[in-house]
Amino acid sequence: MELSKREADIIDMFLIDRNTNTADKIASELKISTKTVYRTIKKINHLVSKELISSEAGKGFSFDYNLYLTEIANSPINATKKSEDSSPTERRMSIIFKLLITSPHPLTIYELYEEHYISDEAIAKDIGKLRQYLMGFQLQLLNRNKMLMIKGSETVIRKRIESLIKAKKLFGDEKFTINNHPIRVEDVNFITEQLLFIEEQLQEQILYPYNINIFSHIYILLIRYKVEGIDRLILAEELPLDKLEKQQIDNNDYEMSVSRSIIRNIESYLELSLNPIESYYLFQHIISSRIKLEGNAFIEKNHVDEIIYYMINRMKQQFDISITRQEIYEDIYQHICSLLYRMKNEISIVNELLPDIRREYVLIYEGLKEVNQELQKRHQLPLISDDEIGFLTLYFAKYNEQVVKKRRVLIMCSSGIGTSELLKVKVQNTFPQIEVVDAISVNQFKKRRLEGAIADIDLIITTINLPEGSGLPSILVNAIFTENDKQNVAKTLEGL
């Protein structure tokens, strides 16, 4: 299913804060009216089998997280959404996609816009926006005799097609459409067969997101070679392979033979000849998912080591992650090798988990973005994409999740004698993850607070009410520390 930006924004509010949201709060946050809030929630609820967001008088809205997981988070994207319901940006991307796959041949403005039901004035505005967008990629939009066409480098055209395919999450879409452009079932089956062939020949599974990269690349070959005269354009752009590229082929001759086999299969499927350079372009995608330094002509071990150790050291400075450098080095090494190869050959990957990663691990993600900028200056690297940073975030998040931060707790009783020591032992036995800093009386607490000696305390567990204005989180318990007390302390610790 495909959510509008407003629908996604409202759902995100509930994902960020599971507490009940009110219409006023949502309206204020998203700068929309409460009427729009109710109308949008109604649309969201129509997308699923029962109410995802329900309301109770006087209490606001509540969110069914389990329903979200089963029917929205893990559902395929439905790209057949009615054009009249799509946003201007979605409409323009649909038009660009159609023009890209038919370039350099023109399409009439009528056939491009007949399903969108917009005025001539809106179409003229659209064309201006399309031209401006394409200029950013060194592509021209030509408008002649009420016909539009895109003119530019075949390499750039393919990269734009690839970015639109990946943005639409091609895998999992039962109808296989991209920007309202249907993909033939025969093509899907053929490409799937080629992926299985590659896996069989390499004797390993091609994992996400590399399977999408190869799927997209083969699909682009199919649609571009169906365009009359396209082979002539590719031939005009073909550059001789340099020394390093030839060495890369020699060092990975088996992968190159697999690539040539796939190209021959495509030629049989299309009943035409492909430019020989296509074998090398496909070869790049195949080995980008399984880069090893041994025999790799593009990547130097010293360079990889410098990047990894710098990244590890900077992240350890920012976050209290208790790992050895060698531990994470071995974990992340293969990924960095593949990442550097992709950057060298301008191969992009899409991370469908990116919105969730940004939301759940915002500090680690932002920390890696900062390190990325530093690496760019130190090693003259291109900026690593947000999608790639998202994957790197998962490596560091794994170690961060393994760290159990000890909460510093102060025990306080009326006298500090006997009962506080007993309570200290009971608390430590029940919650080994906390550090009991001290067990003190209320008078000792007052004295230490005046002296500024009460610092870096996460929680005070006390048998008496704290003096007013203490400014520290606390929980009142029975001196015997009953089962109810243990449950209440556990809940409080979870909330810290």
Image: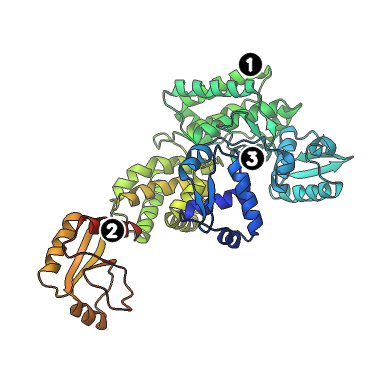
Give x and y (percent) for residue 144: 87, 41
**Residue at 29 percent of width and 66 percent of height:** 458
**Residue at 48 percent of width and 35 percent of height:** 208
Which mark is drawn over residue 326?
A: none
First in sequence: mark 2 or mark 3? Answer: 3
Secondary structure under tag 1 reads: helix
Q: Quadrant of the C terminus?
A: bottom left
**What amino acid type is highlighted by mark number 2?**
Asn
Residue furthest front as drawn: 57
First in sequence: mark 1 or mark 3? Answer: 3
**What amino acid type is highlighted by mark number 1?**
Ser
Secondary structure under tag 2 reads: helix
Residue picked out by circle 1:
268
Front-most of residues 397 and 203:
397
Callout 3: 10 Å neighbours few (<14), some, many (20+)? some
Front-most of residues 236 and 47:
47
Nearest-to-viewer mark from 2 and 1: 2
Residue picked out by circle 2:
488
Compared to residue 62, the image places residue 448 above or below, namely: below
Front-most of residues 121 and 410:
410
Which mark is drawn over residue 164?
A: 3
